[in-house]
Image: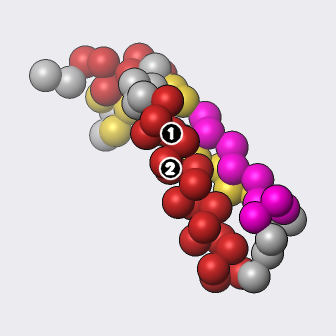
Amino acid sequence: MPIVDIHLIAGRSQDQLKGLVEDVTAAVVKNTGAPAEHVHVILSEMETNRYSVGGVLKSDEK
């Protein structure tokens, strides 16, 4: 049972998220041979004030 955990900044549309999980599932099926119904994809969305790069919150970027 492959589990894929994806962390991303919130703000994508439902259609974008749907396309992402479909494409990721297809890639896992192709490369592992696992059946699609056994592939689990977890999306964790973060607000920009909960994520930083280089010590700078994404919400503080210009």
In the rendered image, which residue does mark 1 sit on?
Answer: 17
Which residue: 13% across, 22% down?
62
Report if residue 41 lies within the magenta region.
yes
Which residue: 69% across, 43% down?
42
Labels 1 and 2 touching (C-beta < 8 A): yes
Between residues 51 and 14, which one lies in front from this camera angle?
14
The label on residue 46 is: none
* Residue 16 occupies quadrant: top left
Secondary structure found at label 2: helix
Name the quarter where the N terminus is drawn: bottom right
Type of residue at label 1?
Leu
Secondary structure found at label 1: helix
Magenta highlight range? 36-44
Total labels drawn: 2
Left/right of residue 25 with respect to residue 37 in the rendered view:
left
Q: Residues within 10 Å of mark 1 (few under 14, many from 20)?
A: few
The image position of residue 8, as x and y in percent, is 48, 38
> Is residue 45 shown above or below 33?
above
The image position of residue 28, as x and y in percent, is 65, 71
> Is residue 43 shown above or below 10?
below
Which residue: 53% across, 60% down?
23
Tell me which colouring the rendered structure shows: secondary structure
Between residues 16 and 7, which one lies in front from this camera angle?
16
In the rendered image, which residue does mark 2 sit on?
Answer: 20
Report if residue 55 lies within the magenta region.
no
Type of residue at label 2?
Leu
Can residue 51 be seen at all in this image of the molecule? Answer: no
Which residue: 41% across, 30% down?
12
> Is residue 25 shown above or below 55?
below
Marks 1/2: CA–CA distance:
5 Å
The image position of residue 15, as x and y in percent, is 46, 35
> Is residue 38 shown above or below 41?
below
